[in-house]
Image (cartoon, rainbow, N blue to C red):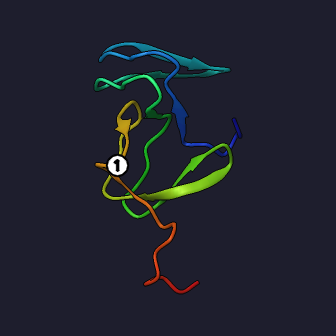
Amino acid sequence: MSPADNVATALRDLVPGAVVEIDDLRVTVSARVPFGHKVALRAIAATQPVLKYGEEIGLAGGPIAAGDHVHTHNVESQRGRGDLHK
């Protein structure tokens, strides 16, 4: 993980109310997060980068609260899109 990350990968199924602890950070899970999916470590505003392992993996499709399930329903991938010009 990178200190810049705003998501973490669930190493087991997480249920609402579970507490994720990473170093000094404590996040209460707000929705079911299946094994291998991501959970938000802090709030991510709409259109802001979603960061995993220090890399941008997409943009938030809408506001994502800390503890939310982060997956294809609320992250827009920017990879392989021919309509984006950087």
Q: Is residue 21 left or right of residue 27?
A: right
Residue highlighted by disc 1: 72
Secondary structure at badge 1 equals: loop
Residue at 50 percent of width and 71 percent of height: 80
Indicate the quadrant where residue 35 lies. Answer: top left
Residue 60 placement (x, y as % from top left): 39, 56
Residue at 68 percent of width and 48 percent of height: 54
Determine whether 32 is above or below 46 in the image: above
Q: Is residue 19 left or right of residue 30?
A: right
Residue 17 placement (x, y as % from top left): 32, 14
Quarter containing the C terminus: bottom right
Residue at 48 percent of width and 58 percent of height: 58
Residue 40 placement (x, y as % from top left): 45, 37
Label 1 environment density (alpha carbons within 10 Å; few <14, some 14–19, many ≥20): few
User: The residue under label 1 is which amino acid type?
Assistant: Thr
Residue at 67 percent of width and 43 percent of height: 53
